[in-house]
Amino acid sequence: MNKKSSVWTTKPSKKQAEVLEFIAKFQREKGYSPSLGEIASHFKISIPTVHQHISYLRKKKLLITHKGKKRSIQPFNDQKSDLVEIPLLGLIAAGGPIEAIRNPEPIEVPRSMLSKGTNHYALKVSGTSMIEEGISDGDIVIVREQQTVDDGEKAVAYLPDKDAVTLKKIYRDKNRIKLVPANKTMKPFYEKNVEVQGKVVGVIRKYG
């Protein structure tokens, strides 16, 4: 009796390969995985169809998803071999000093988030001041150490006059700096004395 061939092969269909490529590219550029809705919008297909493609790709062991974790779709080729350890230095809120984490341990982040020849660190976000930039309470931001950023970029900024560190979008306005939250319920504010401590280059989503 002839044995039946396996239903699942490792080779994806043309559309599945396109979905897989989109997920990998999105994650490299954004620092987090696309949602089902974002995939559906890109390909102009329904969310149930996207779910079906994701299910097939999982069975073909070409990507994984973590149950209970938002935006957890991740290609297998973006796993351990492409992870790098950086220090998780503390907790950053909308304002106030960085709350140091006792005995901080390194965390693993995708190598694609980091730039060669520069230092990086991670901070856990407390609050919702940057939710419209895809940064939620409990997420971890990856920060590249640098003393300047372009207008509109997300930065970790130290405010010496207040002895506070904040995560905001930065804009130059004559002889002062405008710090803008990404939350319509919060107003921007101005400071004359601002020290940029780094640029946000990626986000790691919290679980749940």
Image: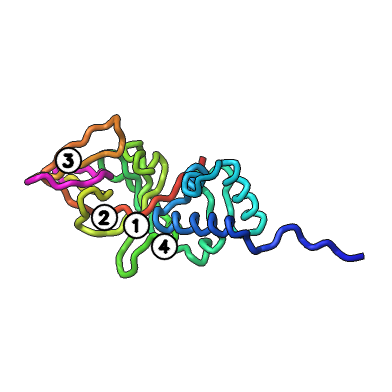
Which residue has dot 4 on it?
Answer: 112
Distance (Cα) linking label 1 and label 2: 9 Å
Please tell me which residue lies in front, 63 or 102: 63
Q: Residues within 10 Å of mark 4 (few under 14, many from 20)?
A: some
Which-is-in-front pick, marks 2 and 3?
A: 2
Which residue has dot 2 on it?
Answer: 198
Which-is-in-front pick, marks 3 and 1?
A: 1
Distance (Cα) linking label 2 and label 3: 18 Å
Which-is-in-front pick, marks 4 and 3?
A: 4
Looking at the image, which residue sits at the far top?
A: 185
CB of mark 3 within 8 Å of CB of mark 1? no
Secondary structure of the residue carrying tag 4 is: helix
First in sequence: mark 4 or mark 3? 4
CB of mark 1 within 8 Å of CB of mark 2? yes
Which residue has dot 1 on it?
Answer: 121
Residue drawn at the location 41% of the way across and 62% of the way down? 112
Looking at the image, which residue sits at the far bottom?
A: 117
Q: Considering the whole magenta stretch, tell me its main secondary structure.
A: strand
First in sequence: mark 1 or mark 2? 1
Q: Quadrant of the N terminus?
A: bottom right
The circle drawn on residue 184 is: none
The circle drawn on residue 162 is: 3
CB of mark 2 within 8 Å of CB of mark 3? no
Image-quadrant location for residue 144: bottom left
Distance (Cα) linking label 4 and label 2: 17 Å
